[in-house]
Amino acid sequence: MSDSDTNRVFLLAERPTGRPDEDTFELAEREVPEPGPGEALVRTLYMSVDPYMRGRMRAADSYAESWDVGDPLRAGVVGEVVESNGAGFEPGDVVTGDMQWADYATVAGPELTQVDPDRAPISTYLGVLGMPGNTAYFGVQDVTEPKAGETFVVTGAAGAVGSVAGQIAKLNGARVVGFAGSDEKVEFLEEIGFDVGINYKTTDDYGAALDEAAPDGIDAYFDNVGGEITDAVFPRLNVDARVGVCGQIALYNATEVPTGPRKLAMLIESRATVEGFLVSDFSERFDQSVPQLGEWVQSGDLQYRETVTEGLENAPDAFLGLFDGDNIGKQLVKVSEYSG
Amino acid sequence: MSDSDTNRVFLLAERPTGRPDEDTFELAEREVPEPGPGEALVRTLYMSVDPYMRGRMRAADSYAESWDVGDPLRAGVVGEVVESNGAGFEPGDVVTGDMQWADYATVAGPELTQVDPDRAPISTYLGVLGMPGNTAYFGVQDVTEPKAGETFVVTGAAGAVGSVAGQIAKLNGARVVGFAGSDEKVEFLEEIGFDVGINYKTTDDYGAALDEAAPDGIDAYFDNVGGEITDAVFPRLNVDARVGVCGQIALYNATEVPTGPRKLAMLIESRATVEGFLVSDFSERFDQSVPQLGEWVQSGDLQYRETVTEGLENAPDAFLGLFDGDNIGKQLVKVSEYSG
């Protein structure tokens, strides 16, 4: 997929207004970098595209640092060590870390985590065993805390985070309702054990759909999307309900501040709690969450799906597709073949 | 103020659409009721009017039960026992409880709490030592939890709840910023120790006012009002900020669902928590909060003010004035003189 001495790197060509498009990205050709002392040269096998990257394209720092125009775009990557300059790895080792939208990157040893390719497919370290899986894990177990007999609602339910969140809520014993954007996705939700899947693109009245799907009200809401579905959820929150705000993808490309019904007064009656969260705040507990997620995957309790786009050159399309809901499960870009 | 054999009682004449007005209320004349077994006849000394009563005028139950058209309006009252039919009180005892917008009410003994008129002025049991004081206490100490060195912002700051909340936050060591609706109220805030008072009626740009008043951002927000001030607070919430939603008086008379900027995405970056709360959920701890509030009042750490409207017949005006911000501190209606 790449010549051994050429490194293709995507740069931020310009800051997008509204929805990013092809002008947002520039594919530059550079030499494959040399690892400095303590660094490894890593060849990208899979890279992750994620909705939060839209925030990094803005001039102001969001929770993630802003990218500068002309800079390489960054991504979670699973790659293979080509050369180690005292980084503590061997050529052929599979590692994961924060790298670039590129064929190769040099990374300091401590910023890489070794991956065991025999334990689980290497791509899962960007999905169910990676950032999205951990986001789902802590968003369910620490933030929204659905209990047996309660009703849990998740948006972006067929995505990398939502599909895992719903299954963990189900393992907790909750009734699980998911919103997704196609009939195919709704079928997927039912396959992986959701009680009800709702196709929000073909549903006019979200409130009526929720009244039917969640007749006892909503105790826990895991929100990846925001907007009108969330507007319908708030009046249906039970007393002491928990809302976890993980993402608001419906709003990320807005060029004006989106407006909607004011909802805070509803929290008085429900005494509900609404909490924003970032998976990075839980990183000290990944040593508990990742083995647990791995066990559930191995036992079949936790199913996952991946949507794989082939070729680094197609990474922008894979990213833009997130905003159309093209992906089921984790959206990955396969950049090169694993030699192992 | 009332003949001994006539009991004036305000009834809900019709459900208001939007802002209540004189047609909402009907003043009926009835006979003074006889206390049944276990009941006391109580003469109203002071009654409380509160914003939450607007919710009880709607057809649907809010957190407080809906009033029916034709029914007596209810209120927190401090009154004097006239006659006890085995209720466990003596004539002349001062009691507080949930009674009516009326000269007299009969109440079951267990629903009354005796008040010590020597410990604090009897009217304070409807204010700083009553429901508003407890709302402030738990909203600060349990929900928004401002700590030393943090910045605490409160709306409706000159009201019965807000003025107490700000002072408790100050006792915790926080920087305290309050929004109120007149220069006189802002002066009051400064008298009682707020760091900054902002007259929201003469301030065009709430964001700029907050940038100046809270240069280090906002760690704790106690919201009694909602609307545009809240819109300006959310983007200024610090990491792990706490928002307590106590009331949304700016919206209570709305006839259509009010809209505003969508704010949930801001919670992701700040990892802030937004929680609605009701003082009634903390009632088991009033035995701790009321003595603490009383101590602070006696030591002068906690100052309070009351706005007293004379005469039961003027209770509707006192209630309606809440929505114009006529009151400083607790709005009371004085119905009759205490004989003690």
Image (cartoon, coloured by chain):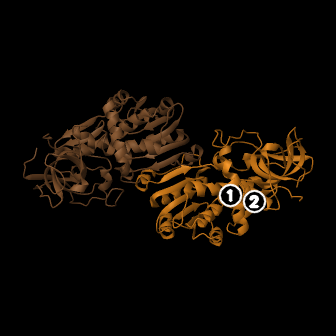
Chain colours: A orange, B brown
Q: Where's residue A201, x and y in %?
A: 58, 65
The quadrant of the image that shows the C terminus of chain B is top left
Q: Where's residue B283, x and y in %?
A: 36, 51
> Where on the picture, by quarter, is residue A145?
bottom right
Question: Whole-Å distance between the Cαs marked 2 and 1?
Answer: 9 Å
Residue behind mark 1: A133
N-terminal label among 2 and 1: 2
Vertical position of residue A131 compared to residue A177: above or below: above
Chain under callout 2: A
Amino acid type of the residue tagged 2 in the rendering: Thr
Q: Is residue A128 visible?
A: no
Q: Residue furthest right?
A: A4
Judge left or right: residue B233 versus residue A53.
left
Assess whether mark 1 and mark 2 are in contact (beta carbons under 8 angstroms).
yes
Q: Within 10 Å of the Cα at label 1, are there few (<14), some (14-19), or many (20+) other Cα atoms?
A: many
User: Which element is circle 1 on?
Assistant: helix
Residue beneath the point at 73% across and 66% down: A298
Judge left or right: residue B211 versus residue B305.
right
Vertical position of residue A250 compared to residue B157: above or below: below
User: Which element is circle 2 on?
Assistant: helix
The quadrant of the image that shows the N terminus of chain B is top left
Judge left or right: residue A337 versus residue B317.
right
Considering depth in this image, is A26 or B284 the residue closer to the camera?
B284
Amino acid type of the residue tagged 1 in the rendering: Gly
Q: Where's residue A153, x and y in %?
A: 55, 62
Residue behind mark 2: A124
> Where on the picture, by quarter, is residue A175?
bottom right
Q: Where's residue A34, x and y in %?
A: 89, 41
